[in-house]
Structure formats: C-alpha cells, structure tokens
Amino acid sequence: MHRWTVLGCLIATSALGAPMRVDHSVRVLDAQGVPIDGAMSIAVRLYNDPELSDPVENLLFSDLFSVTAQQGYANLELGSGVELQTSVFDAPGVWLETQLGTEPPLSPRMRLSGVPYAARATTAQSADRADAIRLISGQPSTTCGDGELGYFLDDQSLRVCVSDEWLDVGGQTIASTGGLITELAGYRTHVFLSSATFTVDSAVTAEVLIVAGGGAGGGRHGGGGGGGGVVHIPVTTIGAGSYPAVVGAGAPTNTGCTGSGGANGANSSVFGETAVGGGGGGSYSAVSGAAGGSGGGAGHSPTSGGASNQGPLVVRTGSVYGNAGAVNPSGGNEASGGGGAGAAGQAAVGEVSGGNGGAGIQIDIDGNNYYWGGGGGGGLWSNGGAFAGSGGLGGGGGGSAAENGTGGAGGGSALNAGIGGATSPSNNANGGAGGANTGGGGGGSGQCGHTTWSVGNGGAGGSGIVIIRIEI
C-alpha cells in the first residue's frame, strides 16, 4: 500500500485558447511514510465535479504518465502527451484527480483555480522547472519573492507570494471556524454575535466589518445614546492562525432618576483594529452627552452633544465611521439625538420635539444592505402633544415621551430594529433599547423621579457585531 501527496500545479501558456503545459508534482510514500524511488505509472484526470466521474458529462482531461520518482518526488507535465486546452478552465469548477498505478485514486479531488494559475503564465514560461514550486516545512522565516510558488508540507497547501505574503491559490479547501457561518457564490461569511475566536488554516482575502456597542440613553429628559463606532475594511489579507473577535456589549439600561447620563457602549475589535463604543446620552441638571464612537445627545438644559472619538485604522486599510451627538440649544424639557455612524444627531426643538438619532452607515457585507450604528432619539416631557426623537436607521432606540407627547419610533433597516420609546401619560416613560447586534444607541427617557412618572429609564444600547467574509 502506497500513499502520496499532490504538491501543486503551475499552468504555463503563451495565449488564451492555445494548448498549455502544466507542471504537476506528487510525492509517493510507503505505508510507513518512507519515500519510494523508481519507475511508476500515474494517471491524472481533470473533472468538472468534485465527485462525479461520467466520461462524457464530467471528464475534462485524462492522461497516463510513466515517471521515475527520486526521494519520492515525481514531476509530470500535463499537455506533453494528450493536448490540454485553456478552455478546460472555463468550467465553473475544475477538480484534479491523481491515481498511482492500480491503486484507488487520491481522494478527495483537489479543486483548481484557473485565474490565479493563468496570472502566473508569463513567469511560468521562463521559470526553471526545479524552482517552479518551493517546498516549505512550517511557516517561512524569511520574505518571499512576488510570483514564487510554495507548497507547505504541514497543511498540504499550495500558495503564491504576493507583496511578501503567501496567499492561497485555490488548490485546497480553506478551513475556517468561528461565529455563525454561511457560504454563497465563492465566499464564506462568519458572523460573530458575541466574542469568540476566528481561525483559518491558510492565508485568505477578506472583507471585515466591526461595530461597537451603542451608548445608553440618558435618564430624565435624556439625550439619545450614540451609535457604536463602525470600522469597514473592504479588502485585506488574513494569514493562517487564530484571532480573537471581540464583540462589544451595548451600555446597560440607565436607571438614574436623579438625572445621570447614560453609560458608553463597549469596544469591538479584530485583526488589530477597534471600533469604539457609543457615547451615553446626556440628562437632567445640565448633563452633556458623552464622547464615543458616535457621541451621545445632549440632555435637559442648554448642553453639548458628545463628540465622536472613533480613531483611525492602525494596521489595515479601510474606513471608520462616527459622528457627534446634537446640542440642546433651548434648555427645555426635551433632549437631543445621539450621533449615528452615518450622520450626526439632530437637536431638540423647544417644547416641540426631541431630537432624532443620526442614521447609521449602510454597508452590505452579508447581502442584506443593513445600516449599522444608528443613534438613539432624545426623550421629552410635554403637555402639548409633542414628539420624542426617533432612533436613527441602523437600530437606534426611540426616545420616550411623558405626559401628552408621543414616543419616538425605533430605527429600522437593520439586523434588528431599535425599540420605540414609550408613550406614557402616567408611568414607565422608558426610552427604547438599541437593536441587538447593530450598535444602535438607546433612546432617552422622557421623565423619571417625578410623582407621576416614578419610572423612566434611558434605553440600553444595542450590542455590536463582527463580520468576516472570506474568499474560498
């Protein structure tokens, strides 16, 4: 009984549509793992399916080679006998099968990617055959040259060097774990609703979204909580390894009837980049909104909204999002909206309305085109039928209205919509919570600690999220 390893393929061709040559390497070992030398026959076949083998419907190419292995290594040149056309790689998928003599074929078949190989055509024509594939045990300790091919013996993966980094070329199945996983059209998406570890067994190209937890709404004439900061990395390379994906919690419900401001949301992070938690909303007794990824809205009395302190990217290239909470210029019994990742919060209008939360930022990483990090709406206390502020798109919670006002709506177009603020002629003038895993800010309280409105909490901020979408 023998066992063997497929080392890799390198397509060499001078023009599309012309016959091509492919260097295909194998290593043959005995049952104890000792390399076998000498003459042997090896069949190589290309199929359009990972399992089906119909000679008419599935077989794209087949040839039999007589070779001599040295230290277990044997090199084959596909196309040197039976002609191999570039059109073979027009199929949606191409799988390679290798068979030694009369033994069963190597299983599973190895999927090939025509585009990366074709991109190496020019280099392949002039490459020395002995240097076409570099065998590597473990991770390389030195940099590699652009276009160099390496076969990693530890995980049996074929990679190409791009900008001093080894990237997978589609010659093996990429294994990755962590979060909720879906696959569609050549991509695998990992959604982290809580903190966990992302693990991948080879270098991959990825898109990354990081959303921090939202800030809580202020209590008693409370401003809306700021939305969590948002980090979007459209394209980056992730090396093989394990990475902690930290999902920030939303700030807890603000139960401060004495007029305390809301707490800030917690940060989210992965791959060395951090989204900053949203700022808490301001409150009674001239409490301004807190700074955060997006700032909290101003509370009762002429106060300031919180600034955005979402910092720039540190390691990778992409965009960061966060905006300020609104000021309260009038100093009445209404409060202003928290900032959203896509827009600043809106200011309250004296005795007329609480300020709306700023809209989140729309980023379509998972096919749903959601908004992320909406600001919370400001609360109010009014006997004139005024409206509390609505939460911003992207999960912002609505502000609550005490007495004769109307509570603000929760922000939608999100993974989970924000909760609307209460409309309360008597008790429980609670601001709405930010949507879970949206980074939405909580809505401000309309009133609290009053004879009629003994309960009136600022809404909790929505938790954050981390989404990693990789090419497979």
Image (cartoon, grey):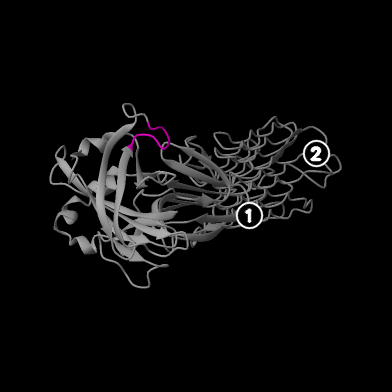
Residue 48 lies in quadrant: top left
Residue 265 numbered tag: 1
Residue shown at the point (28%, 43%) measured from the top left: 114
Is residue 22 shown above or below 50? below
| Marks 2 and 1, the one that precedes in the sequence | 1
| Magenta run includes residue 199 | no
Query: Residue at 26% across / 58% down in the picture?
Result: 68
Residue 46 is situated, as x and y percent measured from the top left of the image, at: 31, 39
| Rendered-image quadrant of the N terminus | bottom left
* Residue where numbered disc 2 is placed: 428
Q: Position of residue 234 (x, y in %)?
A: 40, 49
Instruction: Kindly tell me whether residue 210 is visible in this rendering.
Output: no
Report if residue 50 lies within the magenta region: yes
The span shown in magenta is: 47-53
- Rounded to the nearest angstrom, the CA distance separating label 2 from label 1 is 23 Å
Residue at x 42% of width, y 63% of height: 315
Mark sitting on residue 444: none
Would you identify the image quadrant in which residue 3 lies? bottom left
**Foreground pick, 283 / 156:** 156
Location of residue 265 in the rendering, given as x and y in whole percent from the top left corner = 63, 54
Q: Which amino acid type corresponds to the residue marked 2 in the rendered image?
A: Asn
